[in-house]
Image (cartoon, helix red, strand yellow):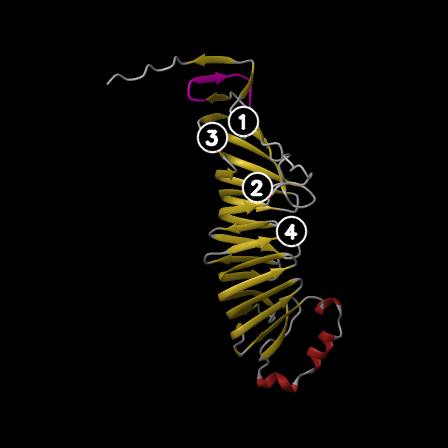
Amino acid sequence: MIEYLVMAFFAGQPVQPAAATAQPGPVATRKSEGPQLGEPVRISSDLVTGSRSQAVFKGNVVVKHRTMDLRCNELIAYYTGPREVTRVECVGNVRAVDGERTATGERADFEVPTGVLVVTGNPEARDPTAHLRGSLVRMTLNTQNFEVENAVVTLQAAPLKQPRRGGTASAASRIPTEISSKRVVGTRNQAVFTGDVVVKHRTMDLRCDKMIAYYNAAREVTRSECVGRVRASEGERTARGERADFDVPSGVLVMTGNPEARDRTTHLRGTRVRMTLGNENFEVENAVITVEPAKEPSRP
């Protein structure tokens, strides 16, 4: 196992050429400058080969930088003119851990100055309450944020307000919520989904252009806001409008923005449509209702 200490900004020489061994002075001076060596990039691997502009690490590669632990099969570290590492590329069995967040995939590009890691190749990401899949995962060191493109996200939903007789929520009341979209950006308090958003929660299918999901202190989704071409369906009931607010614990969806609702025989329009999961009824404010006559049974 070979281990190199590579300075992210101030410099170091991950691969020390033979001619430089006669000039240890500048290296020793840099090590005495605390702030300059505050955020080193430490890389270990089975084999390393280097040139003036880059170093290639192969076999059991482990990168330690700030709060991140990054592992892969092979890594290329790129230098600037002053031999400062600015970027690394990882390939093969990539796994990154930063606090409670993890990301895996087949390839990763890490920009050292910004602390941004981009994982591709069937990437997945996790934190204590979310599982994310997509075509690209972006995470920034020492933050709680994820960005995922073409995302499918499974979030832990807050329990329904339907406790058992003993007073505790049943396992069924904690069914997670699955959300897919073109892109998602998440923080500790919320996640923003944009582009072809599809929400699957219990018996409901909810679709819109953009959605914001809000978390509680336990990182459970308690509420979501949908805007743009909102469509909701549950069984034979459908509702549409320009905006919807969904309260997860109560299962109540409120649709506004020229909302309409339908079931088998009724068409409803108004200023506000309210539907509750598992309940066949609609509530409509300022309602205009069209009731279709029952169809006669067909004769043989």
Quadrant including the C terminus:
top left
Q: Regarding mark 4 in the picture, which secondary structure is present there?
A: loop
Mark 4 against mark 2, which lies toward the viewer? 2
* In magenta segment, residue 235: no
**Residue placed at 57% from the left, 41% from the top?**
172
Asked whether the beta carbons under mark 4 and mark 1 sit within 8 Å of each other, the answer is no
Residue that label 1 marks = 279
Q: Position of residue 115 (x, y in %)?
A: 62, 58
Q: Residue at x 50, y 12 (%)?
A: 288
Disc 1 crowd rating (10 Å Cα; few below 14, some 14-19, many 20+) is few
Kind of residue indicated by mark 3: Ser
Q: Secondary structure at mark 3?
A: strand
The residue drawn where x is 65% and y is 45% is 219
Q: Quadrant of the N terminus?
A: bottom right
Mark number displayed over residue 172: 2
- Residue annotated with mark 4: 144
Residue 264: within the magenta?
Answer: yes
Vertical relation: 263 (above or below) 117: above
Q: Amino acid at mark 1?
A: Asn
Q: CA distance from mark 3 to mark 1?
A: 12 Å
How far apart, in angstroms, are the residues tagged by discs 4 and 3?
33 Å
Q: Position of residue 16 (x, y in %)?
A: 59, 80
Residue at the spot of label 3: 233
Which secondary structure class fits the magenta region best? strand
- How packed is label 3: few (under 14 Cα within 10 Å), some, or many (20 or more)? some
Magenta stretch: give its range: 263-275
Can you say whether 93 is above or below 153 in the image? Answer: below
Q: Earlier in the sequence, mark 3 or mark 2?
A: 2
Residue 169 locus on image (x, y percent): 64, 40
Does dot 2 land on a helix, a strand or a loop? helix
